[in-house]
Amino acid sequence: MASNFLRLRKPYYVESTINCSSSSDQKLVNLSFGIDETRNQTKKRQAKEHHGRRSCLDSCCWVTGYLCTTWWLLLFLYHCCLPFTVVHEVPQLMPAARLKREGLTGIHPVVLVPGIVTGGLELWEGKPCADGLFRKRLWGGGGFTQLLKRPLCWLEHLSLHNETGLDPPGIRVRPVPGLFGADYSAPGYFVWDVLVKNLAKIGYEGKNLHMAAYDWRLSFQNTEVRDCALSRLKSKIELMYRANGNKKVVVVPHSMGVAYFLHFLKWVETPPPMGGGGGLGWCAEHIKAIVNIGPSFLGVPKAVSNILSAEGKDVAYFRAMAPGVLDSGTLGLRALEHVMRVSRTWDSVVSLMPKGGETIWGNMDWSPEDEHVCDFSKKRYFRLSPSDNNVNKSNAKQVFRVKDPVKYGRIISFGKAASVLHSSQLPTAVLKEILHMSASRNFTSSCGEAWTEYDEMSRESIQKIGAADKAYTATTLFDLLRFVAPKMMNRTEAHFSHGIADNLDDPKYNHYKFWSNPLEMKLPDAPNMEIYCSYGVGIPTERSYVYKLSPSNKCKRIPYQIDTSVDGEDRSCLKSGVYFADGDESVPVLSAGFMCAKGWKGRTRFNPSGINTYVREYQSKPLTSGIKSTAHVDIMGNIALIEDILRVAAGATGEEIGGNKIYSDILRMSERINLRL
Amino acid sequence: MSSLRRRKPINESSDSKHKAEEEDEDHDDVDADGDDDVNGKNKKTPSKIKKKRGEKPPKQPKWSCMDTCCWFIGCICITWWLLLFLYNAMPASFPQYVTEAITGPLPDPPGVKLKKEGLEAKHPVVFVPGIVTGGLELWEGRECAEGLFRKRLWGGTFGEVYKRPLCWVEHMSLDNETGLDPCGIRVRPVSGLVAADYFAPGYFVWAVLIANLARIGYEDKTMYMAAYDWRLSFQNTEVRDQTLSRIKSNIELLVATNGGRKVVVIPHSMGVLYFLHFMKWVEAPAPMGGGGGPDWCSKHIKAVVNIGGPFLGVPKAIAGLFSAEAKDIAVARALAPGFLDNDIFQFQTLQHVMRMSRTWDSTMSMIPRGGNTIWGGLDWSPEEGNSCAKKREKKNETQIADQAGSENAVCKAKSANYGRIISFGKDVAEAPSSDIERIDFRGAIKGHSAANTTCRDVWTEYHDMGFAGIKAVAEYKTYTADSLVDLLHFVAPKMMARGTAHFSYGVADNLDDPKYKHYKYWSNPLETRLPNAPDMEIYSLYGVGLPTERAYVYKLSPHAECSIPFKIDTSADDEDTCLRDGVYSVDGDETVPVLSAGFMCAKGWRGKTRFNPSGIRTYIREYNHLPPANLLEGRGTLSGAHVDIMGNFALIEDVIRIAAGASGEELGGDQVYSKIFNWSENINLQLDEEIPVHLSS
C-alpha cells in the first residue's frame, strides 16, 4: 500500500519541483509568504513550548506536509486553469497563425545556423570522472547540472587542447545534431524554439528545415577538419534543394553563425582540398537569401574583455550565469580564472574580436559613434516624424557640446583619465615597449603550475601594461593580446584575420583564415541572392572598457579587471567602467549593420556582383520582454522578426517586406567611416 | 522503499502515542498555568492554545485529522527527498560495483575488449531501425494536441496515451484511403541517433550498440540513423518525406567524408525489408527510383548486417491484422495487456488498436511471403519433425532422462501441422487434411447487419462483413500461407487494396518479367534480384532458442455488437505439439521464426542463384538465447530475443569487427545452432536461372 502510494507520487513530485522555477511570480510570492508564515509559527511554537509537546521533527514534518499540500493544490489549479489562459495568448504568440490565414505556405527550405554558446554539446568519450555521461549533454539543456555536481571535471571536458585547438587526448565532446541541438539553450530558455514553432505552422518539417549544428568552440575550418561539419551542411543544402523541387534555401544564421556562414560561402566555392569544391555558381544556385539575426560581422568589443579578463558582460548568457554560479564558492573562489582558462582554449572566441581596426572602430580621438546620445532611459527614436527628427538631432548636438564626446575608439583604457584625455597627452611608446618586452620574455613562473598565461608573465610587465593612462584601439589591441595571451593568439591567427584587405585579388586571400572576415573577402557571385541584417536596437551595448590593475597581486589571479568604480555623470555612457553604445546588448549597431548599410550596399569591391542588402532593425521598447524583446538572443522570439523570416521563407523579396527599416544612427555612422569601396 | 514500508506503521503508532501524550500534557499545562492566571479557568484553554498555535482557531485543541495528514505527507516527502538526495549523491559506478561484488567481475563490454585488441573505427555505420522502435513526433495537430509540438507521441514515456487516449489514437492513425497523413495532422519521425537509441526510458534498442561502437572511436560523423516513419509503406516514406533520398545522400556523404570507405549497414527487424527496398530503389532510374546507377550499391556498401530480419515475413503479423491479438510485435502489444485492455477506452481498446494499426501500411510488409512453397501446405511444413520437447529438455535439465526420452517418442508420433497458419478449432489443426470439410469463403456474400450506430466510433471493417461473411470465414476451417492473403482480402478489403499496391507476397517465376520493375516487389526477397555487387557481404544475425509464434488456433468469439468476431482460442493446449494458449510455436527469437530469418542466407541467396546473380557472399550467425543470470543484469548480455539481442555481447562483437573491416570468413563463417539448413532443404524452390523460352527454342 505504502509503496503504491509512493510510486504514484514520484513523478508528480519531480514535476512539481521542475515547475517551481517556471511558475508565475504570484505563486512564488504566495509560497514564500507561506514559508515565512509557517516559520514564524514554528518559531513561536518552539519558543513557547518548553515541554516540547511535539518534537521538533514532528513540527518539521507537519510544516513540509502543509507546504507540499498547498503546493500541489496550487499546481493542480494551475494546470486546470492553464488551458484557458493559453487559448487567449496563442494568436499573439503565433504570427504564423495569422500569416497562414493570409495563405502563406513554406516554399523555400530553411537552414538555421546557431551562434556561439547556444548550441548543445554532448560527451562521446571522457575521463573516468565523467563516467555515465556518455551521450549526455555537457552544454545546453540539462547539461549545466553537471557543472554543480562535478565542476572541475566539467571544465576539463569542455576545454580544448591548448596547442591544436582540437580535442585533448582521451576526450571527445561533440555538438548535438538536429533541431534539439539549439532549440532550447537551457530548460525554459528558448533560442530557436519559437521560430521553429512558427515555421512549422506554415508547413515546415524535418525535410525542409535543418539546424546546422556545429561545435562552436572550434575555429571554423576545424569544424570541417574534425567533424566534416561544412561538408555535411553542403550535402544537406543540396539534398533539401533537390528534394523540395529545386527551391533555393533561406539561411538564417544568428550571432556568430553569421561569420560561420560567411566562411561556409567561401569554403563551398573553393576547390578541394581546402574548400568544398562546389564550383563558382554554387551559392547562386542553392541560396535564395541569408537572413542574419544579430550579426556580429565586424566582431564585438565584448570579446576583448572576455579574453583579457574573462569579465565582459555575458556573451549570450555564459557570463550572466557566472555572477550567480561561477563566482560563488563552488570552484574555490577562482571561478573567473577557471573560466578564462577554459574559454581561452576556444578558438571561436577570437573570431568575435573587432575586425577592421581603427578604420572601423575609431582611433584614439575619433570614432564613428561620436554623436551618439547615451541617455537610453529618455532617448527614443522619434525619427518617425521628420520635424521631431530635426529637433532631436539639434538637441543631441547641444548635449554633446556641453560634454566631451566619448572616445569609443579606445576600446581598452587603463584608468578613467586615459579614456578621456586627448591623445597628445597620452604616452605614445606603448607599442614599442610591448614589442620590446615580448622579445625579452623568458620569465619562469614562480607560481608552480601555470593556470593562465598571466602566470607566465613577469610582474613588471604586467605592471607596465596596466600602468595608468594607457589606451588601446582596435588595432593596437592585438599587440596587447599577443603579449598577454601569446599561445592563444598564435593558435588562432592561423584561423582568423581581423584586418582590411587592400587588394582583394591578392592570392593570399584565398586562404581560409580570411573567409570569415567580411572586410577581407568577396561575396560570392550570386546577383539574385539577398542578404538581410536583422538586429535589435535601443539597448545599451558594451563598446569600450576602463580597466585597472586588480588589487590582489597573488599568483593564479587575473591581474586586470574592469574598474567598476568609474561612473560618468547622469546621462553619460559610462557606467561601472563600461562605455555603452547603441546595439542589442551584445552586438553594437556598427558591427551588425555596417556591412549591409554600406560595405556591401550596391556594387562594391566586397560585393562585386551587387547582391541586394537590407537592414531590418527592431526597436526595443522599455520594459518589454518576450514577444517584443530585441535583446541579442531574445530577439529570436520577436514577432516582427519572425514575421519577416516567414515571409522571406514563403518567397517574398526584400522589397516586398518593406526594404530597409532603420531606427538607429547606422547610416550616419557608416558615412563617417572612411573605407574604400 | 523497504525502509519506508517499515516506517509507516511505526509512524502511525507513534502518531497515536503523540495524541495521547498531547492530551496528558494539556492537562499538565492547565495545572501549571493555573497558578499564574487569576481570571479563572474558563478563558485559559483558548488563550493558551492561541499562544501555542499562532493563528489557529481555538476549536482544535489536538492535532486534527488535517494536521496528521500534513504531518504524514511531510514525513514521506522528507524521506523521499533524503532517498533522492542519496541516490543522486551516489557515484555513477555504484550499481556496477554492487553487481561485481555479488557476481564477481563482469566481462568487459565488447567495445572495451576490442579496443584493447587494437580495433579502430573504419567503415561508417548506418542503422536502420525496425517497426515500432523509432520515435515519432508531432509537427501539426488538432486542437486536442495543443502544446505537444515536437513532443514525442511514440517512444519516450508514452505519457500522452494516459492523458488523452482518443486524441493520441487519432494522431497516430493514418488516412484510411491513402495511407498518408490525415488532413491537418503531421506526425514525423524523430531524426538522428536519438530516434531509436531508447524506445522508452531505460528500454534500450540501439543505445548499447552505439555506446560500444563509440568506444572504438565512432561518433556522429561516422554513424547515421536512417530514421523513417515506420507506419508508412516503404515507397511512401519517399513520397512524403523523401526519406530514401535522404538516406542515399547521407550514405554518399559518409563515404565521401571518410576517405571513400564503404558503409556497413545494420538494419534491424522490419528495417531489413526497408533496406532491401532501398537497395532496389537507389539503383532504379528516376522518377520511381533514386537514379544512383546500376553499381551504386557495390560502390557504397561494404556489408549489410541484418539483425533479426523477417525476410519472409512473420506469422505474428497475420494474427495482428486478423484480430489485433498476437503476442507483441516488438513491444506495442506488450503494452496492450497492461493498460490498453483496461477501461480507458471503455472495453474497446482492441478495436481502437486495430483501427489504428490497420491504417499503417507497414504492418502489411510483414505478412508471410512465398506462400505454401515456403511456409508449408495443409500437410507438410519445412519445420516438420520439430520437437518442442527437446527445447523443454534443454530448459529443465534436472529432469530425469527417461522421462525426457519418452516424451520425445511421443512427439515424433504426433507432429504439428505448421503449414496451417490459422485453423478454426484444435481438432481442425490436428486432423489429417482429408478429414477436413472446407467451404470456400471467397464467394460468400457479406451481410450488412452488423453496422450499428453504437459501433460508429470504433468502426472496423468487420462490421461491413455481417454474420454471413464471418461464418464463411470460419467454415473454411484452415488457412495456409497462400489462402491467408485471400482471407485478408476478404476481411479487410480496403486495407489490402492499399497494401497490395505497395507489397507483394509471392514467388517470382521469371525475374526478367518487366513487371518486377515496380516498387511493390522491391521489399520481397523472392521477387527481386540482389544488386550487382560481388564484393558486398550479407549477414543474417538472429537469436534462436526461444519459442516463436508460428500458427494459431482460432475460434469465433461470442458475437457482441462491436467486438472483433475472431479470437485466439487460448484454451487449446497440447504439450506434445508445441501448442500453448492456442499458439503453435517453433524455434526463433520470440518474434521471427528461424525459417524467415535464415532461409535467404542459408539457401535462397547462397552461391550464385537467380535471386543473387552476382554471387554476393552470405553468412548466418545465430546466437543461442540464455536468460539473464540475475536481476541486476537487466535484459541480459546473452539474450537472443528479438529486441534484446541488440544488447547481446557476442552480436555486438561481431558487428564491431565487421565495422572495423573484418570479412565474413575472418569472423568464422556461419555459426548455426538451429536446424535451418535441414529446414531449408525441405523447401523446394527453384534457384537456378531458368533459360528464357525464346533462347531455348
Image (spheres, coloured by chain):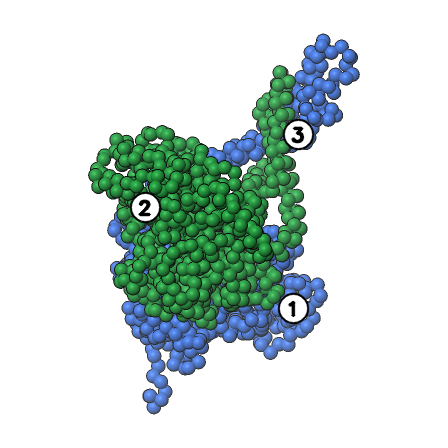
Chain colours: A green, B blue
Q: Position of residue A165 (x, y in %)?
A: 30, 48
| Callouts 2 and 3 in the same chain | no
**B53 vs A644: above or below:** above
Q: At x 31% / y 39%, what residue is drawn?
A: A427
Residue type pointed to by label 3: Asp
Mark positioned earlier in the residue sequence (1 or 3): 3
Q: Position of residue B344 (x, y in %)?
A: 63, 53
- Between B216 and A261, the residue placed more toward the observer is A261
Instruction: Identify the subunit bearing mark 3.
Output: B
What secondary structure is found at the residue carrying circle 3? helix
In the rendered structure, find residue A224 and report the number of the disc placed on it: none
Does residue B407 appear in this view?
no
Q: Quadrant of the C terminus of chain A?
A: bottom left
In the rendered structure, find residue A476 and report the number of the disc placed on it: 2
Left or right: A446 in relation to B673: left
Residue placed under numbered mark 3 in the picture: B67
Q: CA distance from mark 2 to mark 3?
A: 71 Å
Left or right: B557 in relation to A136: right
Residue placed under numbered mark 1 in the picture: B463
Residue type pointed to by label 2: Thr
Residue type pointed to by label 1: His
What secondary structure is found at the residue carrying circle 2? helix
Q: At x 43% / y 65%, what residue is drawn?
A: A602
Left or right: B153 in relation to A242: right
| Callouts 1 and 3 in the same chain | yes
CB atoms at circles 2 and 3 under 8 Å apart?
no
Q: Given the current orientation, which residue lies at the most extreme bottom position?
A: B697
Q: Quadrant of the N terminus of chain A?
A: top right
Q: At x 53% / y 61%, what residue is drawn?
A: A644
